[in-house]
Amino acid sequence: HHFADCHLSRILLKHLATEPLALEDLELADEELHANLRALETMSPETISSLSLTFSVDRVSFGVVQTVDLMPNGRDVEVTAANLETFLAARLRDRVFDARKRSLSALLTGVYDVVPREVLMLLSARELELALCGIPDIDVAAWRAATTYKGAFAEAGAAHPVAAMFWAEVESWDPERRAQLLQWCTGTSRVPVNGFEHLQGRDG
């Protein structure tokens, strides 16, 4: 059994496994856009209307700005509190699929020629990552050292009794269970080449 020594994004894995994408998935691909869209969800109807957003996006190609509609005549449709969820879904679809439709379609076609789509649909994105990349050898000491603590744990950090018990428990686990925990915390079971310091959690 040969594994791919690489890191595949959660978005790509979800595409391969035909798993629905959520707004939270966008954080790993475009942190700024994700933050801006999340901010819209907390704004009042008046504030949303004052932004003068429409169902369109501007793309720059070879120095030329092109306005692309997210729906028929989207540049003429104002974003309001009433249609905000529709706008967020359209913006997500554009960023993770429509803007890269040609290259993504070519990749998916190539993969499905080797492994039928119906087979990959039986796996979740997490299961697919482990099947493709194998179970990594996770250095718990490095993980613990790179962890940022917040709230009641901020002052004591890894020395906090609860944190100490947590890491002792993780150290007792086998590699597969550690990988599953890392997936749950960050969305991936792989550690960046530069180490845990460059790995982003689900909450940023």
Image (cartoon, grey):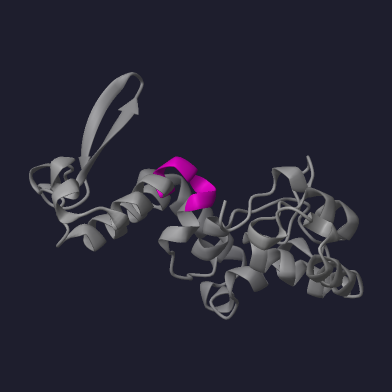
Q: How many marks?
A: 0
Q: Is residue 176 left or right of residue 201?
A: right
Q: Is residue 60 left or right of residue 46?
A: right
- Residue that extends furthest to the top in the rendered view of this protein: 63
- Front residue of 85/166: it is 166
**Whole-percent x and y of residue 169?**
86, 75
Specify whether residue 149 is in view.
yes
Is residue 15 rendered magenta in the image? no
Instruction: Tell me: residue 164, above or below residue 27.
Output: below
Residue at point 26%, 53% (across, down) = 43
Residue at point 16%, 60% (across, down) = 83
* Quadrant hosting residue 173: bottom right
- Front residue of 200/147: it is 147
- Front residue of 71/115: it is 71
- Front residue of 21/16: it is 21
Q: Is residue 8 left or right of residue 54?
A: right
Instruction: Tell me: residue 114, above or below residue 55.
Output: below
**Whole-percent x and y of residue 60?**
33, 27
Residue at point 16%, 55% (across, down) = 45
**Whole-percent x and y of residue 166?**
81, 71
Q: Magenta residues?
A: 27-34
Instruction: Tell me: residue 23, above or below residue 199.
Output: below
Magenta: main secondary structure: helix
> Quadrant location of the N terminus?
bottom right
Specify whether residue 101 is in view.
no
Instruction: Tell me: residue 59, above or below residue 77.
Output: above
**Whole-percent x and y of residue 181?**
73, 70
